[in-house]
Amino acid sequence: MGASEYEVREGLFYSKEHEWLKVEKGQVRVGITDYAQDKLGDVVYVELPVVGRKVKQIGEPKNRDMELGAVESVKAVSTVYSPISGTVKEVNSTLQERPEIINTSPYDEGWICVVVPEDLDKEIKTLMDAKAYSEYLKNLG
Amino acid sequence: MMNYHQARWICESCLEPLIFEMGNKGGSRGILLPRGVGAEINIPEKMLRKSLNIPELSQPEVVRHYTRLSQMNFCVDTGFYPLGSCTMKYNPKVNEELADLDEVANIHPDQDEGTVQGALEIMYRLERLLCEITGMSKMCLQPSAGAHGEFLGMLLVRAYFRARGETRKEVIIPDSAHGTNFASAGMAGFNVVVVPSNNRGRVDLEALRAAVSEKTAALMMTNPNTLGLFEDEILEISKMVHDAGGLLYYDGANLNGIIGKARPGDMGFDIVHLNLHKTFSTPHGGGGPGSGPVGVAEKLEEFLPVPVIEYDEEQGRFWLNYNRPHSIGKIKSFFGNFGVLVKAYAYILSMGADGLKEAAEAAVINANYLMHKLADGKSFKVNYDGPCKHEVVLSAEPLKRETGVTARDVVKRLLDFGLHPPTYYFPPIVPEALMIEPTETESKEELDRFIAAMKAVAQEARTDPGRVKAAPTATAIGRLDETRASREPILSWRMYQRLKPK
Amino acid sequence: MVHPYIPNSRETRDQMLREMGLSDVEELFKDIPPELRIKRGLDLPPAMPELAVVNHVKSVLSKNLPFTKMPSFLGGGVWPHYVPAHVRQIVKRAEFLTSYTPYQPETSQGMLQALFEFQSLVAELVGLEVANASMYDWATSLGEAALMSARVTGRSKFILPKIISKDRLSVLENYAAGPSLELVEVDYDRETGQVDLDQLARKVDDNTAGVYIENPSYLGFLETQVDEIAELAHSKGALFVVGVNPISLGLLRAPGDYGADIVIGEGQPLGNPVSFGGPTLGIFACRGEQRLLRQLPGRLIGMTKTVDGKDRGFCMVLQTREQHIRREKATSNICSNEALCAVAAAVYLATLGPRGLRELAEVCAANASYLMKQLSQIEGIKVPLFKSPHFNEFTMQCTRGSISWLNAELLKRGFHGGKPLRREFPELGEAALLCTTELHTKENLDGFVEAVRKVMEG
């Protein structure tokens, strides 16, 4: 599958680790991209963050404070990093029963959690928009 | 090509039933027991068991069931088993007979030392042989497996620095390493620092230099590494780590590539683990028991687990020394997997110095021969130049790009040829990896058959990719739904009874 | 001549080298720096003929005195039992013996199903839903159980009884060292050996990850306050971990039925020889709930179907917990386990069935009961030291003379005595741990009693 065949949704913001972020009223919604779910294969388990947990925006070097959880397929585990600093407000508990919705609906039903950001205006500038992320995928080959 | 089909025992709708689905309740049993003295036993009612739901079967039913299961299992006695990093060599039969002797099977670890002199002598002698083979000063036979040996190694590293009043928290591991290395270091409380491989498939010296510091406790390495390549800059690496005060740990999974040709102790390694169930021919038993002895340089001897087997020359007897104040204690209940140790001891004697060297040479020739014949760049390629050692890592990327057939598909199709496939998708730094370790056990004819099968599969990927993707069909069972198995795990009969639709 | 274990002749080898454009095998080793090459060959004996190896190994081993030739009363973590002939024969079948870990499920259904059956049989035996495909031994299972309790609860204190094998304790300490778990011992009642409940209640707190007991205890008596201990552990949110000798469960209540969250133990007595203490078979089972399952160490075999939905089959599952995928974040570093010993255990349990296992447990316990009674009538011998019901092991104290003296004298009279306890429990004075199984005949037991009597009468 070529890079252009992955869905990149307009209006969302993207991290280099293939997390998406959607700005909502006073909060952001987070998930993994279509590209990420495809690379991982059939998702069998999603490790969700605890509500109330404080997270830091992803940066280098990565550390545990930036982790929101993990998405697992049969033979791989992918850490989900937070695209934004803040506090976890809500998690998608449907994923515990039906992890496969990450594969079938990564941008809608398969969202992972909602975070109340600390400094959205500043941090969002470090993320990619849809166009930039599409370019980024192309360069990954 | 050979016309192959594995046994497939079918009962109505499924393969051989589960043992829980067999038998007639309320009568059969598989063995009669002695009656004992018939004394009264005094166990309070509340501690007695009310029921136990396990099957009731006669002996022939039990034997037939497990014999049928065995027939649905591929093994190295029936065919080529080139799993990379697993060293599936011939398991000599004489070793089995020796390990079954009354004097091995029926001695207890707490017997008076005077009544187990033979066992202590075998262990003592085996330690000496393994020290000579590895170039280490002292061996501990306690670990049950390679990873268990790694864990012991990490505990020794910890004890060494503690005794020196240093706290070093980092263990450096190359990105091509076995997963156990990372896990063992983590379990012992170290932080893992990963160093990348260079474009020659070896540890990147510049990256290593940047990673090594006064925080470095140890560098864990496999040599030859998991790409089958000898780390030819090992002396520089060793110096770099030692200059920073760190220790060098050797993962012996791949020793078969250099045994009798070079020794980890001479390369500067301070701690070495071996896999007797790989290099030293003891059978793997479908996952174990193995044995993972750990050898150390002199400066680490005092930390080894208790007891240490000593020989008292004056009295002419072996004894167990527990009086070791700096010992880390124990990592296994008793002295190690003794039955496995006997087999490895017999193997080393059977091979002798020349035989071991010959094994390494034959294993290396076989691996290079496969590389020479298979890495054509069209279907399979090697990402790193130079002769390999005991194993070769091919990438099926060219084939995948052209046909969409993946390394996994190739592996599944090979099963139809009566071959066990190579390890695949490891090491992770090689895309579409096929990690092939033929060992010295395979003849040229067998290798040629494997080469022909690989080429046939590659050809088929171009002409009939659907057939490759539908493989295997000659095994007891077709491709399994591993996703379902992990999404809704059914891990026991009890769980199955609860979860199955009523 | 090449070695008989290597098929390719010199000629074939040379031909292969030529095909690769090489003239000498050394060219394949040229990347090993010259100063590292072994110059004169390893200092090992030359290859020995098979017969010579057999003769040599047998000759060395003849210095052992197996318990089949002289009755032994040793147990304490590995227990001598009869291994039925067919159990040995099945695990010697090359298909099981010479296969690797079942990474390719389609061609390894036999091993996978046998291991699934092992998991299922162990689960029934201990009264829980999930058992893994084995750990190395009881001690390492204990170490892993402590680590797992800490991960599941996010806490760092692990409570254990003072009566435990000190070798097992040492292994536990080594496993607990990585994440710096605090190990806290609970004392025992000097009369009964039972865990001191008041002390336990004081020690269990909000940072307690797990409470561990052994049943039967290391010194052979039953821990009968199991329901109270389970309640104490659970009231503070700690996991309840129980260690067992699986043979006892033919007779005794399953730990899962009295609240155990994790059950561990030594599976060797299930169809595996004592073999000087190894190979052994670590049992590891837990409740089926997600929060435990996700943290379980070791390999798990699961039932599934083929992709086309036609056949039922088995494969390794939840591998993302394991080292080859999760690396330093794995639930354990274990890779090779004791699979073949697990197959032996499955065949053994299927052979005995529920009634056979119950009878076996009864015989073991009855022999111990008889021996205790007979020994207790000897002057200078106190048996058992604890007023509690016992399974098949018990303590014996020698009030005149040391255990090492007694054992040395017994050896002269043709018996391996009990395990001296001085190193582990100095507070028990001159005491030993004795064990009986179905291997002991009445003659063995009476002969042993007579020998002890003679020695004590001096």
Image (cartoon, helix red, strand yellow):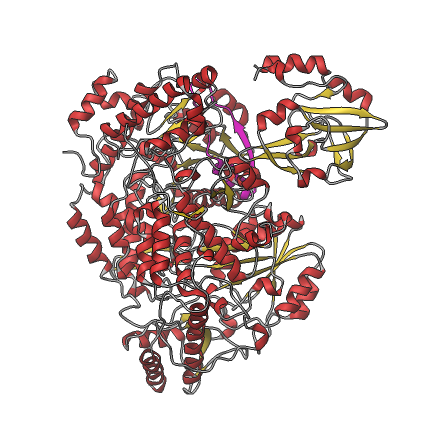
Q: Position of residue C410 (x, y in %)?
A: 32, 76
Point out the image quarter for the N terminus of chain C.
top left
Q: Position of residue C367 (x, y in %)?
A: 41, 77
The answer to whether one can see residue B368 in this image is: yes
The answer to whether one can see residue B287 in this image is: no
Closest to the observer, B166 or C56: C56
Closest to the observer, C396 or C321: C321
Q: Position of residue C32 (x, y in %)?
A: 32, 24
Q: Residue furthest front?
A: B12
Closest to the observer, A1 or B46: A1
| B153 on left or right of A111 | left
Q: Position of residue A79 (x, y in %)?
A: 63, 32
Q: Is residue B303 magenta?
A: no
The residues colored magenta run B177-203
C178 shown above or below C277: above
B105 shown above or below C27: below
Instruction: State the count of labels.
Output: 0
Point out the image quarter for the C terminus of chain C.
bottom left
Closest to the observer, C361 or B276: C361
| C30 on left or right of B235 | left
Residue at 34% across / 66% down in the picture?
C82
Q: Residue furthest right?
A: A25
The answer to which image quadrant residue B90 occupies is top left
B408 shown above or below B78: above
Q: Is residue B178 magenta?
A: yes
Residue at 67% across / 32% down in the picture?
A101
C306 shown above or below B235: below
Q: Residue furthest left?
A: C1
The answer to which image quadrant residue A52 occupies is top right
